[in-house]
Image (spheres, helix red, strand yellow):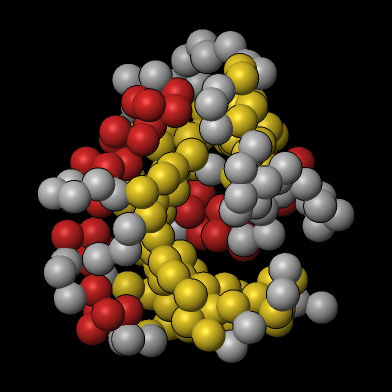
Amino acid sequence: MFKYNLCLFRREDEILLLNRIKAPWMGCWNGIGGKTEKGETPREAMIREIHEETGIKAYTLHFKGVVTWTWNDQPHGGMYIYLADVEDTYEYSTPLATEEGLLDWKKIDWIMHPENGGIAKNIPRILEKMLNDENCYNHHCVYEGDELVKWEAFDMNPAVENAEEIQKILSTRENITSEYIH
């Protein structure tokens, strides 16, 4: 099992993001998340992190797969990813300063803009599939230094959210979407 999780909250055409004050991705807009504690399932950890970081209680949580990454040619880690939907009329006032950073709603078009250097580099790559595809994916990101140089999406079984042998499931590489970044 991976020890990290990440959630993107959707409200109509906006995503709730966190401008992090700590590494990794310090100073960049990213999702909400953290570490899985001993004895927690990935979903339980995500629900706890959502409560701790936002206090939001009324949402629908969807498991969307995992993000794995290689850094300087070395496998480096992974995290479970979730999409949380709130009602289009849900009121959650931002910007809001927290211990982790600044929470704010950002327009999806702004997040996806190719010249946006203020967003964690993998978020625009995974967000499109999270929003527009019901399937689960392993979004594999390859970094050289701080640069994202390749992104691949492997179709995966949603049972991986609760699987103990995650590496076996992730090694199946069906329906690959790959994009080299230039």
Residue drawn where x is 55% and y is 22% of the image = 98
Residue drawn where x is 29% and y is 33% of the image = 48
Image quarter in which the N terminus is found? bottom left
In the shown orientation, is residue 110 left or right of residue 38? right
Residue drawn where x is 53% and y is 85% of the image = 74
Task: Give coordinates of residue 30: x percent, y percent.
Answer: 60, 45
* Closer-to-camera residue (76/8): 76
Task: Give coordinates of residue 179: x percent, y percent.
Answer: 66, 79
In the shown orientation, is residue 106 left or right of residue 174? right
In this picture, is 130 found above or below 144? above
Image quarter in which the C terminus is found? bottom right
* Closer-to-camera residue (36/29): 36
Task: Give coordinates of residue 141: x percent, y percent.
Answer: 57, 73
Single out the residue that lies furthest toward the right: 115
Task: Give coordinates of residue 135: x percent, y percent.
Answer: 36, 62
* Closer-to-camera residue (48/43): 48
* Closer-to-camera residue (88/83): 83
In this picture, is 30 found above or below 133? above
The answer to which image quadrant residue 136 occupies is bottom left
In this picture, is 177 found above or below 77? below
The answer to which image quadrant residue 171 occupies is bottom left
Residue drawn where x is 25% and y is 47% of the image = 37
